[in-house]
Image (tube, helix red, strand yellow):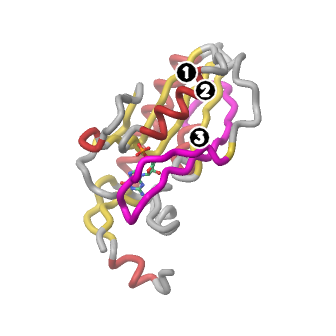
Amino acid sequence: MIHNTEEFMSRIRNVLFTEEEIKAAVKAAGQRISAEYEGKPLLLVSILKGAFVFLSDLCRAVTVPCEVGFMAAKSYYEGTQSVGEVQITMDLKQDISGYHVIIVEDIVDTGRTLRDVAELLKKRKPLSLKVIALLDKPDRRVVEFEADEVLFTIPDKFVVGYGLDCGEYYRNLPYIAEYGE
Ligand code: 5GP
């Protein structure tokens, strides 16, 4: 438990992407999606909890009609290191077979979460399936997986903010920063 703001902020190292940089990148992504999906039934699927901030900004940057849906996946961590299992803890409520689906994710790290979620959704025969990720750490990949679109590529560092947490804190930071004990 973190008790005060001083303690909270003492773990924040350098800011990697400012609020303004994120806003510009999300706006551009929304414009690309709007151009590509005009006239098509579009469903944005966010993976909770990490992608909730990204989804909420991205869906408002999309100017064509779209629906949103939520799934929750849990990947097991020891401290800041992934230990390899992914569990779908909350599934989508809608039938996706009539939609062009875009999975909206916070970060591709080992690749396990997105590989598993994408495989699961593909079996449900959406009209098409793409993945957009806010961040990508390609050096950390342990399974073969590439998102169709990535907003920012980062080195192997543990980051927080803009939806990404450490022990459930820091999701509310409006920027993305490196975390350090
Ligand atoms: P995967 O290893 O399956 O690609 O990523 C699983 C999840 O681990 C991500 O969706 C994200 O929630 C979390 N994760 C991976 N890298 C980081 C990181 O640098 N910071 C934070 N806060 N979470 C991360």
Residue under label 2: 121
Marking on residue 129? 1
Whether label 1 lies within 8 Å of ligand 1 gets the answer no
Q: Residues within 10 Å of mark 2 (few under 14, many from 20)?
A: some
Q: Residues within 10 Å of mark 3 (few under 14, many from 20)?
A: many
Q: Mark 1 and mark 2: span between their CA atoms?
A: 8 Å
The type of residue carrying mark 2 is Leu
- Residue 36 location (% of width, % of height): 51, 17
Q: Mark 1 and mark 3: span between their CA atoms?
A: 13 Å
The range drawn in magenta is 61-89
Counting residues from the start of the chain, the first of labels 1 and 2 encountered is 2
Label 1 with label 2: CB-CB less than 8 Å: yes
- Dot in front, 1 or 2: 2
Query: Residue visible at 55% across and 34% down?
Result: 117
SS of the residue under disc 1: strand
Residue under label 3: 46
The type of residue carrying mark 1 is Leu
Query: Residue visible at 61% across and 35% down?
Result: 45
SS of the residue under disc 3: strand
Marking on residue 111? none
